[in-house]
Structure formats: C-alpha cells, structure tokens
Image (cartoon, rainbow, N blue to C red):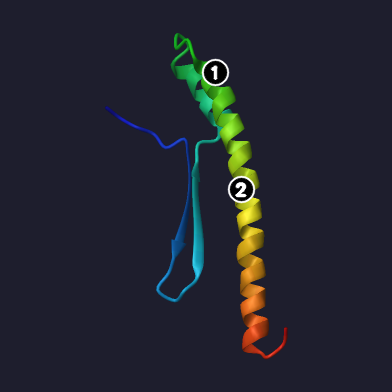
Amino acid sequence: MTKTVIQSLVYYLTTKGDIELERKRLNPEEFLKYFERKKPEYPNTYDLYSFIKCVDKLLDETQEESEKLVHTTVEKDEREKNGSI
C-alpha cells in the first residue's frame, strides 16, 4: 500500500537548543487538479479536497502562531544574554 503525506508539522529541538519547524503539505489545488485529470472516476475527490483545504488552513494558523512563539522566545533569550529585560 502506498501512502502520501497530506500534512505534517514537526518541531525539532536541535543539539544547539534551537527549535526548528518543518512542514510538509499537499497543496489542495494541485490535489484537485491531479484527481480531476488522472482519477475522474474517484467518488470522494471533492470531500478529500475540502478536508485537505481545512487541514491546510488549520496548520497555516498553527505554523504562524508557533513562529511567533519561537521568535518571541529567541528575542527574550537575546535580551537576557545582553542583560536587558
């Protein structure tokens, strides 16, 4: 059985103590074009397309908020290193 990642958002803690974010995603529009062209008989194309769009939007928001948190933490760490609060 072949599997495809629809969405993935992974946070890594590096040996330096940095947080790295990695995202893999299936573009909803590309998915729809592919299925309409290559698998027109598949009955759940539009249901899956809607699901992928919804998950994509949720992870966009999650990624944006996560990047704010990581950026804020990095700024705070730098201020503390420099003796300013």
Q: Is residue 9 above or below residue 44?
A: below
Secondary structure under badge 1?
helix
Q: Amino acid at mark 1?
A: Asp
Q: Residue at x 63, y 37 (%)?
A: 57
* Relative image position of residue 34 (x, y in whole percent): 49, 24
* Relative image position of residue 36 (x, y in whole percent): 52, 17
For this orientation, the residue located farthest to the left is: 1
Q: Residue at x 50, y 71 (%)?
A: 18
* Relative image position of residue 68 (x, y in whole percent): 67, 60
The reply, left or right, for residue 19 in relation to residue 71 is left
Residue denoted by label 1? 47
The reply, left or right, for residue 37 in relation to residue 72 is left
Structural crowding at the residue carrying mark 2, measured as other residues with C-alpha within 10 Å and reported as few (<14), some (14–19) or many (≥20): few
Q: Is residue 52 above or below residue 75?
A: above
For this orientation, the residue located farthest to the front is: 85
For this orientation, the residue located farthest to the bottom is: 83
Residue denoted by label 2? 62
- Which quadrant of the figure has residue 78? bottom right
Q: Amino acid at mark 2?
A: Thr
Secondary structure under badge 2?
helix
Q: Residue at x 66, y 75 (%)?
A: 75
- Whether tag 1 and tag 2 are in contact, CB under 8 A, the answer is no
Structural crowding at the residue carrying mark 1, measured as other residues with C-alpha within 10 Å and reported as few (<14), some (14–19) or many (≥20): few
